Amino acid sequence: MKAEAKQLYGIVAEFDTTSAVLAAARQVRAAGYSKLDAYAPFPVHGLDEAVGAPPRALPKLIFCGGLTGGLAGFFMQYFACVIHYPLNIGGRPFNSWPSFIPITFECTILFAALTAVLGMLALNGLPKPYQPLFAVPAFKRASQDRFFLCIKSRDPKFDASQSRRVLEQTGALGVYDVEAC
Amino acid sequence: MPVTMDTMSNSGNNQNQFSGGRRLALGLGVAGLAICLGLGLSQREAAMEAYLLAYLYWTAVALGCFSLLLLQYVSGGRWGLAIRRFLEAGASTLPLMAVLFIPILMQLKALYPWADPEVVAHDELIQMKVAYLNPTAFAIRTAVYFAVWIIISRLVIRWSRKLDAGDDPAIEARTRRLSAPALVIYSLTVTFAAFDWGMSLEPHWFSTIYGVIYAAGGALAALTLSTVVLSRVGPKGPHAAFMKPETIGDLGNLMLAFTMFWTYVSLSQFLIIWSGHLPEETPWYYVRLHGGWQWVGLGLLGMQFGLPFLLLLSRDRKRNLNRLAGVAIFILVMRYIDLYWLIVPAFTDTLRLRVLDVVAMAGIGGIWFAVYLRSLASAPLLPVRLTRDATGGGDHHG
Amino acid sequence: MATEPKVEKFDSAVLRGRHSYDTVTDKIASIVLTRNQPRAWIFGAAIAFSLLMLFLYTAAMVVAKGIGIWGNNVPVAWALDIINFVWWIGIGHAGTLISAILLLLKQDWRTSINRFAEAMTLFAVACAGMFPLLHLGRVWVFYWLMPYPNTFALWPQFRSPLVWDVFAVSTYALVSLMFWFVGLIPDLATLRDRAQNRAAQIFYGVLAMGWSGSARHWSRYETAYMILAALSTPLVLSVHSVVSFDFAVSVLPGWHTTVFPPYFVAGAVFAGFAMVLTLAIPLRKIYGLQDLITMKHLDNMAKVMLATGLIVIYGYAMEGFMAWYSGSPNERFMMYNRLFGPYGYTYWLLLLCNFVAVQFLWSPRIRRSTLGLFIVAMFVNVGMWLERFVIIVTSLSRDFLPSSWAQYHPTFWDTGLFIGSIGLFLTLMFVFIRLLPMISIFEMRDLVHKTGGGSPRESAENKRK
């Protein structure tokens, strides 16, 4: 039993409609599993909630990124023009804050956008070019026209044969073992 | 949500609706204008300055309603249907504003330097513009603006009422066809109206974006006013079945967009003039950034942009009508302060606050609201024919 | 060909015909995952590549000999280089508008055109960037534009709009690239899983970074994508506003006017939509994408073009009126010179292209005819280039000091570089069409789902409802 569980990454079931995979996810959750994930070829509304608490950290991170960018952008100019190298240009004050607005704005956007993209990738654990699920031949269609639901072996309730039965009861088109790599 | 006959009958033509509000507004308006007139006999200039400021505020709201009314026909969308009747009511005050312009025409010399031959005789720059800036041309142009606005708004409103009465549904398409060219005509007329009424108070100064700033401020005021009215009548009336959180969210997003647009045009005008530092242009900002006015300007940056911007970022606030209406009231007040900062420094170098300004606001505002509410009571609060389908089952696809 | 009707039938659908997840996937992915290309691709790519050679040649000569070989002089120290810069960067704006603003407005019709419109943005920004870089003369010290710790103890001049431009354009390029790439990730995974040969599997596999389509990943992905859209919207407005500041914060009549920022932004979107139409009309024909890029799309784009065109005309009207109203002799002369001076013909041509030609878009018949639209779009492409010529060259050639007035005549190196940059743009476009899906596949699946389709079983279920 133990040896087998170690070799497995999880068990995955295949569906052909969004409603089927949503129903299955709820059913498996109701059966007491917590470490599961669903896979879809496009964002399916409500699927993230069906497999567990949806992640919510990103917007706050992006707000902080933008704030940092804006402050850094403004004070970089302030430091250059007022503290480090004050220079009279066209009789304008050293602290020409109206002229500093555009760059402050651009830096805000740049930092926020970088935080959005890098934050999204980091929280998703990407890049990670190879994943155990890719060894399942049917899983190729997860990026095309099929939906999948996977119970992971990390789940405290995981039991190869019983979990397989739970997935089969959801009306899946097929259920496959996923070997750990 | 299916619409029962109950909610529909609620929206029926009810002349008694808002009668209390109308009486109160009318009383306030007449009293305010009477005080203005009384004080005007002794302090003519002060009374006219207060009158013009209040006039420009309420005209901006009326024109904003008019432009949004046309815009929602062009763009479509549920938010437009939800506030269409409020916008119609706002646009139907335009004939009133035309009448209220007469005192300004009678007292041009008290307000506009170019209307005073003494001033023009000693000012070469104004002499260059005399072909445009003279009382006759000014009066004719104003008459043309109002004629155009009143004709278009009458047509659009009449067609919308006809549709309710069960007339030809093709009328909606006809209104839509009129709206796009009407918006083109509107944008040109409102621009020159803003040049005439506001910009020419300081006849040396000029800015090509001035008309856009005035029109955008008016649209923002109209949108916020409609949101406030919606939050008053919405929960009880037919809107209860029609409104969805997304519809309120759309209003909130539009409010955010107009707030940002106002900031964008105002700040870029400032940046361009500040950087150019030309003797024809800079004095306009110099006055507005000295003698106490600078605090008003700074306050505008924080309160007309900063605070509403931060408040309107929240998705939850944008989906809750009462909380959104709170922001809307705040913006409506800030619209007045913005106009104050735009107009009053033309008359005085130092910041001043006059009771008369408030009295004039109440005077014109009271009468404005009386007309607004009368128009609101004259028709169902939602366009019946169109929303019946939209409320019933418009959401099933395929 | 003869049997095909001249005018496609107009219906308001953004997705025509019966489609399911696998048919849209197959339709779009197979354009990329094939050894065969339509003859039009080979033919077009060959022309584009030849023009690219012209670009490389002229650019190399400019770097080797210096910008003295251009026709620039004093007072016309800025000419085709900045005209081309503004023209290209403006074209890019439509891509961001389609991908970001229409996403926020929940407009379904953006789905089938956003990918290549975004690619167009990137390539247009790349072309735009070439011109100020080459105008530096010593292009290899371009990094002096950036603030960085240096032994000269000097900083960029932060009060100058040209430095704002550096920040705005590089932020724009970077954010557009990220937006485009993030949009591509799920499609790259699709191509990875569909590719038959090993090289393609590795190529797309590395780029897809291991995207598995996990529900949690999608959740964060959608959040990030929506926020990127919300950030790109003010960004795109700021970029062309900053470009307009390059002129407006100076004191030159014809440049210094407060309507410039919104008027430049509208002009940029206007030019950009003209370019999207210029590309989309032949593309949908060559690749048979009429079901996915429908007449509804073209009609909508024509409407946006009309609206932004009218704003641009509003800008012309304000410039004209205010030049007179200002009472300033310099302003009044500028307008007179624009209309009747030695370059007067460019202004009248500009009005023909941007004012007269656009009015045809009021007619639904023109908006719904691919040929009519294509012709109007070509007029706008030319008109928006002329607009920048009028603003820049006409104003500079006759400025405050009549003794220094001079005419500007572009040399071969000016025009060669401009025509060559079109080659650079088109080459990048052809490579993109060959290597990456030009329509977002996952968003098309989403659209199929939203319009009641899906897998065979799903559409049957929906029909029963």
Image: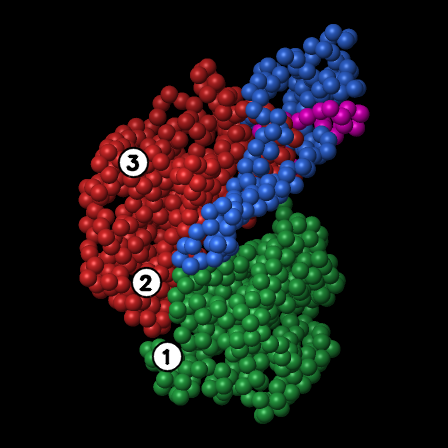
Chain colours: A blue, B green, C red
Range drawn in magenta: A24-46
Q: Which badge, 2 or 3, is on the more N-terminal residue?
A: 2
Q: Quadrant of residue C197?
A: top left
At 46% across and 77% down in the image, what residue appears?
B201
Label 1, residues with CA under 10 Å away: few <14, some 14-19, many ≥20: many
Q: How many marks?
A: 3
- Was residue A26 drawn as part of the magenta stretch in this picture? yes
Confirm or deny contact between disc 3 and disc 1 (CB under 8 A): no
Marked residue chain, label 1: B
At 53% across and 67% down in the image, what residue appears?
B289
Q: Same chain for labels 2 and 3? Say yes or no.
A: yes
For mark 3, what is the residue? Answer: C423
Q: Quadrant of residue C334?
A: bottom left
For mark 2, what is the residue? Answer: C253
Residue B286 position within the rendered picture, expressed as x and y whole percent measured from the top left: 48, 68
Up-down: is C350 above or below C460?
below
Amino acid beneath label 3: Gly
Judge by depth and name the residue closer to the eye, B224 or B266. Answer: B266
- Was residue C442 drawn as part of the magenta stretch in this picture? no
For mark 1, what is the residue? Answer: B126
Q: Quadrant of the C terminus of chain A?
A: top right
